[in-house]
Image (spheres, grey):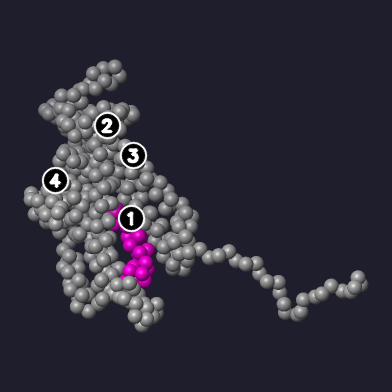
């Protein structure tokens, strides 16, 4: 009817709300949180820049520096301002005895950061040393996290005698100061070969500091994972799976491990930073990376005697370590905020 009033909704009825967008999954939501963290993104960019620059070490030594960063160049010379200058010059301090390496030239070319006491290009050695330091940091972190995750899962889930035995072994490692234990293992193994199945690790191999650093930090990661597994073992979904007769290893793999994976990921950049510092300390004490290989720690050791005449030899790798460790720690904080479901409560 044309004159009829329009139909009215009954009292108390309201227009249905628009459908909400589908909720993001856990990992997608964490990734979105991480993308909204400017400090984490900046630290990741700095870290990638350091990795790319160190990866270009062979090209820098061949096309820019035109020197062999591992060969002594005591009698070498370079052209500076159209004049030939010795890489190692006669000392002018004190009695004028000995030789002083050429200082930083601050140019994109040979000896941009100067030379060390063997006449080697510091910038080229810095990049090569960064490759080894980053490699040791990443590889030892993978070993540490793998062993710690396996140990924490087995100890926390199976409990009983298994948990007691593993906990005692972790307590024994925990009782030793980290650096004292790492130095002791390095001194014992550095002059002999270590055979692990088909693998043979010599004292001059990078695999030795990787293995030592990866093992000594296992208790520091395994204990938090074990505690988390102990709480998950009594959760409802695990008890329900156990009641349905699901095999224990399937529960461990499909239910427990995914729930502790976020903790392992948060540990990764933090342990990598710690492992880089440990490698630098061991190499500075001559029980880490062995010549002719180089790392940031060995370069600092080479520059120890040049602090008053050529400080850049020791300062440059120190700055590289500070930047790398700082970027890894900030990235680790960002990952923790993104993966921790209680992050909103903290905010």
Question: Height in image: 326 above or below 81?
Answer: below
Q: Which secondary structure, mark 2? A: helix
Would you name the residue on which mark 4 appears?
204
Give residue 121's position: percent from left, percent from top: 23, 32
Foreground residue, 183 or 168? 168
Would you name the residue on which mark 2 appears?
61
Left of 42 or right of it: where is 53? left
Would you name the residue on which mark 1 appears?
269
Q: Which residues are magenta?
A: 252-276
Disc 2 and disc 4 in contact, CB within 8 angstroms: no
Q: Residue 254 magenta-drawn? A: yes
Q: Which secondary structure, mark 4? A: loop
Give how far apart the Cα atoms at labels 3 and 4 are: 25 Å
Q: Earlier in the sequence, mark 2 or mark 4?
A: 2
Picture quadrant of residue 97: top left
- How packed mark 4 is, by other alpha carbons closer than 10 Å (few <14, some 14-19, many 20 or more), is some
Picture quadrant of residue 132: top left
Give residue 164's position: percent from left, percent from top: 20, 76
The mark closer to the camera, 3 or 4, is: 4
Would you name the residue on which mark 3 appears?
53
**Visible in this render: residue 93?**
no
- How packed mark 1 is, by other alpha carbons closer than 10 Å (few <14, some 14-19, many 20 or more), is many
Disc 3 and disc 1 in contact, CB within 8 angstroms: no
């Amino acid at each position: 009817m044309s004159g009829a009033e329009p139909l009215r909704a009954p009292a108390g009825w309201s227009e249905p709300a628009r459908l909400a967008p589908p909720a993001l999954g856990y990992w997608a939501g964490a990734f979105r949180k991480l993308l909204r963290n400017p400090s984490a993104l900046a630290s990741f960019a700095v870290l990638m820049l350091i990795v790319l620059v160190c990866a270009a070490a062979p090209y820098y030594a061949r096309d820019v520096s035109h020197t062999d960063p591992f060969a002594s160049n005591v009698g070498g010379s370079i052209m500076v301002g159209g004049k030939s200058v010795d890489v190692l010059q006669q000392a002018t301090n004190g009695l004028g005895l000995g030789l002083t390496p050429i200082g930083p030239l601050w140019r994109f070319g040979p000896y941009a950061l100067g030379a060390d006491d063997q006449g080697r290009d510091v910038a080229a050695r810095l990049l090569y040393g960064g490759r080894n330091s980053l490699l040791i940091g990443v590889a030892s972190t993978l070993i540490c996290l793998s062993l710690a995750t396996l140990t924490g899962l087995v100890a926390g889930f199976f409990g009983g005698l298994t948990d007691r035995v593993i906990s005692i072994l972790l307590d024994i490692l925990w009782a030793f100061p980290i650096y004292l234990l790492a130095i002791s293992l390095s001194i014992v193994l550095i002059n002999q070969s270590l055979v692990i199945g088909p693998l043979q690790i010599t004292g001059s191999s990078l695999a030795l500091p990787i293995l030592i650093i990866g093992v000594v930090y296992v208790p520091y990661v395994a204990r938090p994972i074990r505690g988390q597994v102990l709480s998950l073992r009594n959760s409802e979904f695990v008890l329900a799976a156990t009641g349905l007769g699901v095999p224990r290893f399937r529960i461990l793999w499909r239910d427990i491990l995914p729930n502790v994976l976020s903790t392992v990921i948060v540990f990764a950049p933090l342990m990598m930073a710690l492992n880089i510092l440990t490698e630098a300390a061991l190499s500075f004490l001559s029980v880490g990376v062995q010549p002719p290989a180089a790392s940031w720690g060995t370069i600092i050791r080479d520059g120890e005697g040049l602090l008053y005449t050529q400080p850049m030899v020791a300062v440059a790798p120190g700055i590289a370590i500070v930047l790398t460790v700082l970027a890894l720690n900030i990235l680790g904080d960002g990952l923790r905020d993104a993966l921790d479901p209680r992050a909103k409560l903290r905010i």
